[in-house]
Amino acid sequence: MTNATIANPRTLFVAVTAWAAALSGCALAPGGAPVADAVPVQVYAAGSLRGALTDIARDYEARTGQKLVLTFGASGLLRDRIEKGESAQVFASADMDHPQRLSARGGWQAPAVFTRNALCALTSEQINATPDTLLPTLLRSDVRVGTSTPKADPSGDYAWAMFRRADAVQPGAYAQLDAKALKLTGGADSPKPPAGQGTYAWVMDQRQADVFLTYCTNAVSAQAEVPRLRVVQLPASLQVGAAYGLTVRTGAPATAKAFALALQEPAAQAVLQRLGFGAP
């Protein structure tokens, strides 16, 4: 995972305000927001944002009348689809690397962090791990460790970053974890759960892994779906923070820029934090 410099979280706020002010000939509502357009705004977003953005979009559409089309997936795969020509106008990634790559290629604004997440361990009921015993548990030869797919899904990149931190705690841990980790989700060819089932709840319910390293928000949702699962916090020595990046296509309509701005405003931030995401 690229250790890129994170933009100031207010950068996009300032930029979007400037974009809106610079638009000429664009009809504005009395409050200064763009009048709803009949053409929906195309929003591509990390799969871990599905619950939060679905709620935010519902409220936003009711308040503004502007329709949104949400497309969810692994951030790396979404970035690849955008680079191949798909018409996303707003991109909300689970990391900063993928939106920064779009910006560096041209045609997208410099991204800013708009929310945060962290890694947790989602375990079967047969694993009795605590934060203090998690690393020895992961290293046990009889424990299958599941992850998402690096490069395609930032969750996998964060897992490998955690493996590197583990090596500082116990030399040789990286090699063991790198060799044994099962890349079960997030890839272009990863099996999908049946309709109505969450990916991580399904993977663990099918006993494809004994421990799955994923975002804490995903782990909590999976446990709600399959109560016998357990959520274990990573100790500080292993913790890897996930900074979510937001960018808007250059030349996108004012309605797209307005939605990107709304994602950083208190109403949307309250939804994100209610579902376990962190403040920017």
Image (cartoon, rainbow, N blue to C red):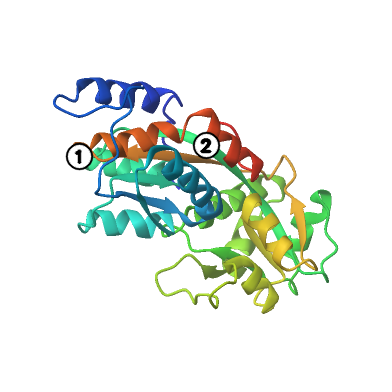
Can you see residue 229? yes
> Residue most toward the left?
25
Between discs 1 and 2, the one toward the N terminus: 1
Q: Which residue is mark 1?
A: 106
Dot 1 amino acid type: Gly
Relative depth, front residue between 126 and 258: 258
Looking at the image, residue 139 lies above or below residue 5: below
Q: What residue is at 75 percent from the left and 75 percent from the top?
A: 142
Looking at the image, residue 4 lies above or below residue 29: below
Q: Quadrant of the C terminus?
A: top right
Which quarter of the picture shows residue 267? top right
Question: 243 left or right of 118?
Answer: left
Q: Residues within 10 Å of mark 1 (few under 14, many from 20)?
A: few
Q: Position of residue 251 (x, y in %)?
A: 18, 36
Q: Which residue is mark 2?
A: 268
Q: Position of residue 94 (x, y in %)?
A: 48, 47
Q: What residue is at 48 percent from the left and 41 percent from the top?
A: 244
Q: Position of residue 85 (x, y in %)?
A: 20, 57
Which quarter of the picture shows residue 84? bottom left
Dot 2 amino acid type: Ala
Q: What residue is at 63 percent from the left and 73 percent from the top?
A: 202
Question: 74 left or right of 20?
Answer: right
Relative depth, front residue between 170 and 196: 196
Relative depth, front residue between 110 and 221: 221
Q: Position of residue 96 (x, y in %)?
A: 42, 40
